[in-house]
């Protein structure tokens, strides 16, 4: 039971009430929501808002299986574990990018690092839940590479531009910013699914 509590605390991503380092305050928004808002510079925010309305695209090649109360716990835990693993390397990509952007992005980079730290903790907790019950730990999947993910994001942005859905100059930075946004946006959605996985007994 204790382990479940830890995990839920970890993956629901701490609620923050305010920011100190010049970042806007989002009331009781979750860290994930704050990251989503904060990761997008104002300049391309309206464009991003526009394209979100046109598509609910998620990161490619995520674990597709869903948890359900009719499945054995063994399967639900395995699915949750794999869903968490999907984000381990993308969070590191997001962190590395923001860290390179200098002092103005230091706080954002720290938040992403925190999220990465909690995600890693969640993966470890999940692994313990699995091994404690002598279930097999799913083999580590190779997650999507940075090059492939960036390529996917660039192609997606380009298709929106080509269809006159947004007007945006697609620089490498725009690709990375959108990619980081996509990572957090997807993580936020997947978090809900993962909480479902562990709510079934
Ligand atoms: C990281 O998480 C801890 C615990 O929730 C929190 O106290 C700290 O302020 C967080 N750091 C950042 C930069 O968000
Ligand atoms: C989380 O784990 C990955 C893979 O082991 C590692 O590269 C990354 O640095 C870890 N994140 C933190 C914040 O320690
Ligand atoms: C997703 O996986 C498929 C099959 O492994 C691969 O062909 C495809 O290139 C991957 N997509 C991306 C964006 O990496």
Image: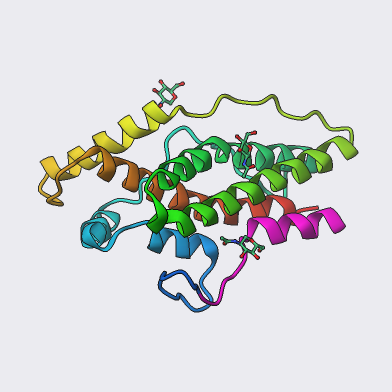
Q: Position of residue 128 (x, y in %)?
A: 83, 40
Q: How is the image coloured?
A: rainbow
Quadrant location, the N terminus: bottom right
In front: 145, or 139?
Answer: 145
Residue at the spot 19% in from the left edge and 39% down from the top edge: 159
Q: Is residue 81 above or below residue 21?
A: above
Q: Position of residue 50 (x, y in %)?
A: 22, 59
Q: Position of residue 108 (x, y in %)?
A: 46, 57
Residue at the spot 57% in from the left edge and 71% down from the top edge: 16
Residue at the spot 53% in from the left edge and 76% down from the top edge: 28
- Note whether residue 140 is visible: yes
Q: Is residue 191 left or right of residue 27?
A: right
- Residues drawn in magenta: 1-18
Q: Is residue 4 left or right of residue 161?
A: right
Q: Position of residue 38 (x, y in %)?
A: 39, 62
Ligand 2 - quadrant of the structure image: top right
Q: Is residue 140 above or below residue 44?
A: above
Residue at the spot 19% in from the left edge and 38% down from the top edge: 158
């Amino acid at each position: 039971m204790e382990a479940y509590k830890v995990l839920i605390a970890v993956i629901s991503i701490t609620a923050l009430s305010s920011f100190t380092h010049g970042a806007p305050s989002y009331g009781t928004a979750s860290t994930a929501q704050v990251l989503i808002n904060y990761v997008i510079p104002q300049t391309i925010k309206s464009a991003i808002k526009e394209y979100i309305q046109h598509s609910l695209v998620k990161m490619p090649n995520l674990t597709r299986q869903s948890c359900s109360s009719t499945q054995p716990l063994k399967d639900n835990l395995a699915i949750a574990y794999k869903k968490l693993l999907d984000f381990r390397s993308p969070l590191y990509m997001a962190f590395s990018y923001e860290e390179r952007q200098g002092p103005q992005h230091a706080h954002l980079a720290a938040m992403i690092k925190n999220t990465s730290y909690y995600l890693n903790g969640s993966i470890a907790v999940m692994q313990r839940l699995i091994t404690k019950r002598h279930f097999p730990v799913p083999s580590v999947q190779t997650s999507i590479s940075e090059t492939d993910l960036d390529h996917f994001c660039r192609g997606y942005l380009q298709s929106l531009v080509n269809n006159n859905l947004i007007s945006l100059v697609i620089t490498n930075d725009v690709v990375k910013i959108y990619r980081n946004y996509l990572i957090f946006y997807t993580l936020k959605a997947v978090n809900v699914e993962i909480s479902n996985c562990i709510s079934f007994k």
